[in-house]
Amino acid sequence: MPTMQKLQEVTGYTRDGLNKIFQSVDLDLPLVERGLARQFTRDNFVELMFLTSVLRIVKDYGEAERVAKMWKTMERDNTLDPFWVINPRTGFFDTKGELRYGGFSDPEMSVLSLQTYVSDSEADAGYRGDDNARRAGTYAGASSVIVFDLADMVRRVDELFEKVAEEGA
């Protein structure tokens, strides 16, 4: 199983940065004896890939943890869309604390379409109409969007675990 060094390489976080995450969120990590390298499972890596990606945008550990756990559950249940879009102004959750749905599967989706998926307005957030409403000026789309390539994150974790298995065999 991969260790902290591999986790650092895959996430781009330092050891100190990852240790701060371990102390700030509730993760189901394997116990480690002092002086021994912690061995991470595939699920640990997937969750930490999601978590570190969200933490680059959202500085609230609780919010990032909620998103990462939801994505991890969706990935485990094979219901995770390959991509996720958010509006940094409105965030991942609505005023009721519900996750704003931002999943999509078309890698060639236009920026205009992504902007209609998320909105700068709380009232319009989650709108799923066509681009015509945006073009007609009846819908205020997002002024900026952030796209997460969740499928690529999972692919990178799976490739790492395959490589480690080959080296160990």
Image (cartoon, rainbow, N blue to C red):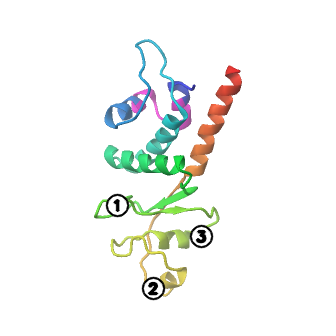
Q: How crowded is mark 2: few (under 14 residues within 10 Å), some or many (20 or more)?
A: few
Report the residue marked by disc 3.
Answer: 110
Point out the image quarter for the N terminus. top right
Contact (Cβ within 8 Å) of mark 1 with mark 3: no
- Residue situated in front as seen by the camera: 110 or 45: 45
Q: Is residue 34 above or below residue 42?
A: above
- Residue situated in front as seen by the camera: 12 or 155: 155
Q: Earlier in the sequence, mark 1 or mark 3?
A: 1
> Count the marks: how many?
3
Report the residue marked by disc 1.
Answer: 98
Q: Which amino acid lies under the numbered mark 3 shown in the image of this protein?
A: Ser
Q: How far is mark 3 from mark 2, CA to CA?
A: 18 Å
Q: Residues within 10 Å of mark 3 (few under 14, many from 20)?
A: few
Range shown magenta: 7-18
Q: Who's the residue at 28% across and 63% down the image?
A: 96
Report the residue marked by disc 2.
Answer: 137
Tell me where residue 17 appears, x and y as whole percent: 40, 32
